[in-house]
């Protein structure tokens, strides 16, 4: 019940296209849903995050869409650029009963071709 | 701020040797997390501390792994004895636990290779 399922595993998009990565969860106790971006040889870095009382959050070319009833959320990258090529992780936070832990999805390797 | 600092950045050791990974969290953060990343298993939470106290070590693979946080600015993850299957990238992360300040900041990682 603490799993976060992420798809696809890998994604190839042409420059200027839209990249879409999806995640699903089961535990309704999750209270915070971040997306992390990781470049080779680096640690994951927060890209954008959303709380379950909001259906959408946009920061520049990056948008999170959140569907609380379906227990799904997705990352949309508009006008994808080669510099966006990285691995993206969705996550969900459990912050109750003394816990404060992020459950990460398996990751999506995005390649944006020029 | 310098961010989360980890050392060493790379470690190559032989099976059976003791390995110690080090982490300095961001000043003022009260949570510290140790993760392991492999191609097969992805990003796994090993253990985390709140105010230097271990809260959840359910992700520690076995007794060969141990972690300590003697003070707010330093933590270690020790593997003794090390095995080839421990080869992975180990990340340390820190955060504030409060609503609105949840971001976990990751260090650059330690790439461990056990021969």
Image (spheres, helix red, strand yellow):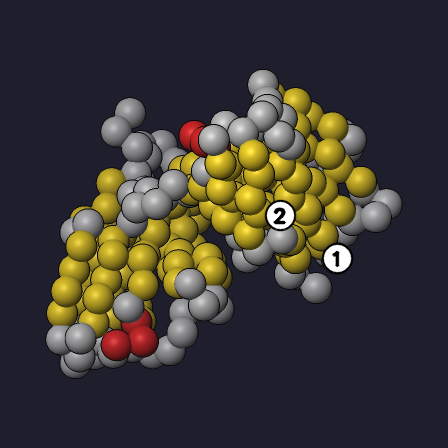
Is A29 left or right of A60, judged from the image as shown? Answer: right
Up the image or down, B105 lies above or below A101; here it is: above
Q: Nearer the viewer, residue A55 or A112?
A: A112
Residue B93 against residue B78 in the figure, above or below = above
Where, quadrant-wise, is the C terminus of chain B in this rendering? bottom left
Q: Position of residue B48 (x, y in %)?
A: 42, 55
Residue B20 is situated, as x and y percent measured from the top left of the image, at 19, 62
Q: Disc 1 is attached to a residue of which chain? A: A
Residue at the spot of label 2: A92
Point 16% across, 81% down: residue? B16
According to the image, label 1 marks what residue? A26
Residue at far right of view: A69
Residue A68: horizontal and vertical position, in percent?
81, 42
SS at mark 2 in the image: strand
Image mark 2: chain: A
The answer to whether residue B96 of the structure is visible from this angle is no
| Image position of B48 (left or right of A62) | left
Residue A47 shows in this picture: yes
Is A69 left or right of A5, judged from the image as shown?
right
């Amino acid at each position: 019940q603490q799993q976060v399922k992420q798809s696809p595993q890998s994604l190839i998009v042409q420059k200027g296209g839209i990249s879409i990565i999806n995640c699903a969860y089961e535990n309704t106790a999750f209270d915070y849903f971040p997306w992390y971006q990781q470049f080779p040889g680096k640690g994951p870095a927060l890209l954008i995050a959303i709380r379950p009382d909001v259906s959408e959050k946009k920061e520049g070319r990056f948008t999170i869409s959140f569907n609380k009833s379906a227990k799904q959320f997705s990352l949309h990258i508009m006008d994808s650029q080669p510099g966006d090529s990285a691995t993206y992780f969705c996550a969900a936070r459990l912050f109750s009963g003394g816990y404060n832990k992020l459950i990460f999805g398996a990751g999506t390797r995005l390649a944006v071709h020029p | 701020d310098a961010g989360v600092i980890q050392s060493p950045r790379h470690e190559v050791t032989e099976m059976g040797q003791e390995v110690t990974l080090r982490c300095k969290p961001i000043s003022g953060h009260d949570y510290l997390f140790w993760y392991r990343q492999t191609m097969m298993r992805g990003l796994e939470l090993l253990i985390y501390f709140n105010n230097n106290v271990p809260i959840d070590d359910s992700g520690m693979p076995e007794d060969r792994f141990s972690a300590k946080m003697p003070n707010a600015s330093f933590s270690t993850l020790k593997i003794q004895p090390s095995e080839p299957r421990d080869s992975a990238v180990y990340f340390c992360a820190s955060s504030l636990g409060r609503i609105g300040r949840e971001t976990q900041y990751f260090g650059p990682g330690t790439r461990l290779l056990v021969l």
